[in-house]
């Protein structure tokens, strides 16, 4: 095996949304002890690296993405001792812990921000972005990602505003200030020194803003223009990222996965190439096939075709290959609807077979697979009838905006149901008891109403389940020969296939892996015959020594090895 390859390159990653994974003390909220109690489950899935969505101290306006103390665990999740125990217990099972790094902004409850607004002369004033205007109006017309102006007034200081890219409870840090940057690096190194393996890095292309702070022509009726035009992947961000990476991650050989929206293919080599700022960035391209514009990600569109999906997957792969880098491949995360509901248009077919076909589709692409909790069970979206059933700040803001724009209550609910981040945040389904084995207490967020058959207990004893297939995928991906084909081989799209079939081959000089996925409910004839050893057939979850295949059933997927 090639010893130059980074340590994480054959790993399988798993994202835990701690609030919804497992509750250990029956308060209806998932916690660290709950995670510890499920480590064996993750080991059975062949998970190597566990990414925890934020568990730091937070008032939870944006569910932990608003941090009020970077070096404390929120009591809702447990204590630092619990965290240390999690580290030890994971290591015992050869698994690493990866934390979420949210450094574009803090919570407005962070002591730095509290100092900054209560004392304009404090050194913390320059940790954030404040502007005073002579006419008392907002400094410009930029629109925050969660809606409304990016500027909010500072209490007791008429005409003075602070800046936030996301919600008003999430003031942006001022990365232009070297003291702030240094303090952030110290915090990062403190965590790395503790023994975590790396970070998933939140909203990182937002840390640099255009310093002219100029208004833009409005892009909607509210008279505002999206902040991303002046505050995402802007000139100068690369200097910050270079310094960040050199001062922290590189010193520890940490694995880092950037949430880096707004990159062009030309930026990729700098971000993830040989000496890139990060180990990987997420490939969100196919995940976002159902939105017209990623900057308005909460508005879905259903007109895409499998042919287009294919195009996006291979275009992405081609770009990352040119960059010399490696993608983190994802179907789901805590910001996205469930993949079954998103990519399978006919509700009747949003079932285990389709979930398995989708799993096979992305698991063997060059890059590392990330599994989001519940994806391995085939969990789905469900319709919420009342605004009270939502928790997500962006869903609620978007509901209010829809109402302000004249939509009825029903229409507004339907807009947010479709893309709401709460779709992915419902509690994990461990069994089919009343709260699905997640808790004995009513969970913090309304549960899915489809628990029967879609839970760990039942799927563990069903040989055809989605869970059994993901376990098998994990096993295959860890086979030394298979993993070396993926890390060292070249990807080729298979072209002469019917529109509904996604097919690719990864080849080294001596070996190859062929993946064929039928993303339609209809059986399809292939124009070529494929043969080789069968690594997995999605319809049976089985492998076999040799097959010859010239057609696929509806939602059937195969991995063939030569
Ligand atoms: C990222 C997170 C999202 C969060 C936002 C602000 O996009 O994934 O959950 O709301 O950043 O931190
Ligand atoms: Ca709890």
Image (tube, helix red, strand yellow):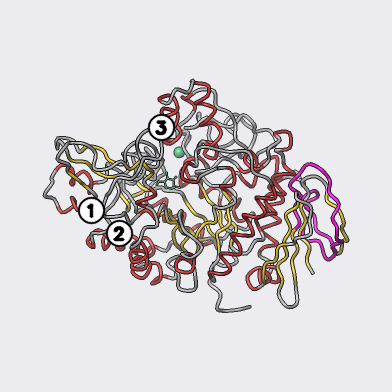
Residue 183 spot, x, y in % from top left: 26, 60
Label 1: how many residues lie within 10 Å, few (<14), some (14-19) or many (20+)?
many
525 is within the stretch colored magenta: yes
Q: Nearer the viewer, mark 2 or mark 3?
A: 3
**Which circle's residue, 3 or 1, is located before the other in the chain?**
1
**419 left or right of 349?**
left
Residue 290, x across and y down, in percent: 59, 43
Q: Is 201 rendered above or below residue 429?
A: below
Gap between marks 3 and 1 measured at Cα: 27 Å
Callouts 2 and 3 close, C-beta under 8 Å = no
**Outermost residue to the front:** 217
| Badge 3: residue crowd in 10 Å (few <14, some 14–19, many ≥20) | some
Q: For mark 2, does the 10 Å Cα neighbourhood hold few (<14), some (14 to 19), or many (20 or more) residues?
A: some
| Residue indicated by mark 2 | 184
Q: Is residue 211 above or below residue 64?
A: below
Q: Indicate if the residue with disc 2 has its beta carbon within 8 Å of ligand 1.
A: no
- First in sequence: mark 2 or mark 3? 2
Determine whether label 1 and label 2 are within 8 Å by CB. Answer: no
- Dividing the image into four equal quarters, which quarter contains ligand 2? top left
Q: Which residues are magenta?
A: 516-545
Q: Residue at x 72, y 42 (%)?
A: 352
Q: The N terminus is located in which quarter?
A: bottom right
Residue bearing mark 3: 397
Q: SS of the residue at dot 2?
A: helix
Q: Residue 190 magenta-drawn?
A: no
Q: Nearer the viewer, residue 286 or 212?
A: 212
Relative image position of residue 452 (x, y in whole percent): 68, 33
On the image, which quarter does residue 198 sit in?
A: bottom left
The answer to whether 256 appears left or right of 532 in the picture is left
Q: Can you tell which of label 3 and label 1 is closer to the viewer?
A: 3
């Amino acid at each position: 095996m090639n010893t130059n390859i980074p340590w994480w390159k054959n790993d399988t990653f798993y994202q835990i949304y701690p609030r919804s994974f497992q509750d250990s003390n029956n308060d209806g909220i998932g916690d660290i002890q709950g995670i510890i109690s499920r480590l064996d489950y993750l080991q059975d899935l062949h998970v190597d690296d566990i990414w925890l969505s934020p568990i730091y101290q937070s008032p939870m306006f944006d569910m932990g993405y608003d941090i009020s103390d970077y070096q404390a665990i929120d009591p809702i999740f447990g204590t630092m001792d619990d965290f240390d125990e999690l580290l030890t217990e994971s290591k015992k099972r050869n698994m690493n812990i990866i934390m979420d790094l949210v450094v574009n902004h803090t919570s407005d409850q962070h002591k730095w921000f509290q100092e900054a607004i209560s004392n304009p002369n404090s050194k913390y004033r320059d940790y954030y972005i404040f502007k005073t205007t002579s006419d008392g109006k907002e400094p410009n017309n930029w629109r925050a990602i969660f809606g409304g102006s990016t500027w909010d007034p500072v209490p007791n200081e008429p005409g003075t505003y602070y800046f936030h890219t996301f919600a008003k409870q999430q003031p942006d840090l001022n990365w232009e200030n070297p003291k702030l940057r240094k303090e952030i690096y110290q915090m990062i190194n403190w965590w790395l020194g503790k023994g975590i393996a790396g970070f998933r890095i939140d909203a990182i292309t937002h840390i640099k803003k255009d310093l002219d702070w100029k208004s833009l022509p409005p892009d909607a009726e509210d008279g505002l223009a999206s902040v991303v035009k002046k505050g995402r992947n802007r000139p100068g961000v690369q200097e910050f990222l270079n310094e960040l990476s050199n001062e922290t991650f590189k010193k520890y050989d940490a694995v880092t996965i950037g949430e880096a929206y707004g990159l062009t293919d030309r930026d990729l080599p700098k971000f993830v190439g040989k000496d890139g700022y990060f180990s990987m960035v997420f490939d969100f391209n196919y995940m976002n096939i159902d939105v017209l514009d990623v900057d308005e990600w909460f508005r879905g569109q259903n007109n895409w075709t499998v042919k287009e999906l294919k195009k996006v997957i291979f275009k992405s792969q081609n770009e990352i290959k040119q960059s010399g880098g490696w993608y983190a491949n994802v179907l789901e995360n805590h910001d996205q609807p469930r993949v079954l509901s998103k990519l399978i248009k006919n509700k009747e077919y949003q079932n285990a077979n389709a979930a398995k076909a989708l799993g096979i589709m992305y698991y063997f692409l060059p890059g590392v697979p990330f599994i989001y909790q519940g994806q391995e069970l085939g969990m789905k979206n469900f319709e919420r009838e009342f605004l009270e059933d939502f928790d997500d700040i962006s869903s609620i803001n978007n509901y209010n905006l829809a109402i302000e724009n004249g939509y009825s209550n029903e229409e507004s609910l339907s807009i947010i149901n479709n893309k709401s981040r709460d779709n992915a945040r419902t509690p994990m389904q461990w069994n089919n008891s009343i709260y699905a084995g997640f808790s004995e207490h009513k969970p913090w967020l309304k549960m899915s109403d489809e628990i029967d058959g879609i839970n760990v207990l039942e799927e563990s004893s069903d040989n055809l389940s989605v869970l059994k297939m993901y376990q098998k995928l994990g096993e295959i991906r860890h086979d030394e020969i298979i993993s070396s084909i993926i890390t060292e081989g070249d990807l080729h799209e298979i072209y002469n296939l019917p529109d509904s079939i996604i097919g690719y081959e990864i080849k080294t000089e001596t070996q190859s892996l062929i993946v064929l996925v039928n993303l339609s409910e209809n059986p399809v004839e292939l124009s070529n015959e494929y043969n080789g050893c069968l690594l997995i057939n999605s319809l049976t979850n089985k492998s076999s020594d040799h097959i010859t295949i010239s057609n696929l059933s509806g939602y059937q997927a195969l991995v063939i090895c030569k």
